[in-house]
């Protein structure tokens, strides 16, 4: 796993410490598991964009915090129970790649749906400006300018 850099302030630019980024994003994933979309988007910049792979959310780019919140609600509404667990964090240029495991149980069912995928969070001034969803983890690494070798460095 790549190691996140320590926080340094250069002018108006703050770099994140491992604990800060991992802690903040871990809180976001805990909120996703609770389906608390207001909490998930509390760190979103006013110009936030959600980029989906298409299909399930039926929109490729969703602009604005309120529209993103509604998209999450719509996507997860068929599920009685949801868990989104971050498995690894990787840093790219102004981006954090998160490999995650998502488990969900549809309402009225005892079956679970499980998938491993990735998010790419773009951060600016301590706020999330974009969240991209990638069904293929390798695609997320590539989008952040990282390679599979980078992902395995330090592991």
Image (cartoon, rainbow, N blue to C red):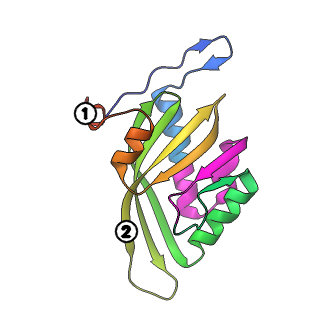
Residue 44, percent across and down?
68, 43
Place residue 140 in its image quadrant.
top left
Report if residue 44 lies within the magenta region: yes
Question: Helix, strand, or loop for circle 2?
Answer: strand
- Mark positioned earlier in the residue sequence (1 or 2): 2
Mark number displayed over residue 80: none
Residue 46 vs 110, above or below: the answer is above
Which residue position holds label 1? Answer: 149
> Residue at the spot x=63%, y=18% of the render?
13
Magenta segment boundaries in residue numbering? 28-54
Q: Nearer the viewer, mark 1 or mark 2?
A: 1
Residue 49, percent across and down?
65, 47
Residue 75, percent across and down?
58, 70
Which residue position holds label 2? Answer: 114
> Residue at the spot x=56%, y=79% of the render?
78
Q: Is residue 153 left or right of residue 54?
A: left
> Residue at the spot x=44%, y=36% of the render?
144
Residue 146 vs 82, above or below: the answer is above
Residue 87 vs 15, above or below: the answer is below
């Amino acid at each position: 796993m790549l190691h996140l850099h320590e926080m340094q302030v250069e002018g108006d630019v703050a770099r994140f410490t491992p604990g800060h980024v991992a802690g903040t994003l871990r809180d976001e994933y805990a909120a996703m598991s609770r389906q608390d979309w207001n909490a998930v988007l509390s760190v979103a910049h006013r110009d936030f964009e959600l980029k989906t792979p298409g299909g399930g959310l039926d929109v490729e780019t969703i602009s604005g915090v309120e529209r993103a919140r509604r998209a999450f609600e719509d996507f997860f509404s068929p599920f009685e129970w949801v868990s989104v667990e971050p498995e690894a964090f990787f840093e790219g240029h102004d981006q954090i790649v998160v490999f995650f495991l998502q488990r969900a149980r549809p309402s009225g069912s005892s079956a679970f749906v499980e998938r491993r995928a990735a998010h790419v969070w773009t951060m600016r001034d301590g706020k999330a400006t974009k969240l991209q969803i990638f069904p293929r983890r390798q695609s997320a690494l590539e989008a952040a300018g990282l390679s599979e070798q980078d992902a395995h460095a330090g592991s």
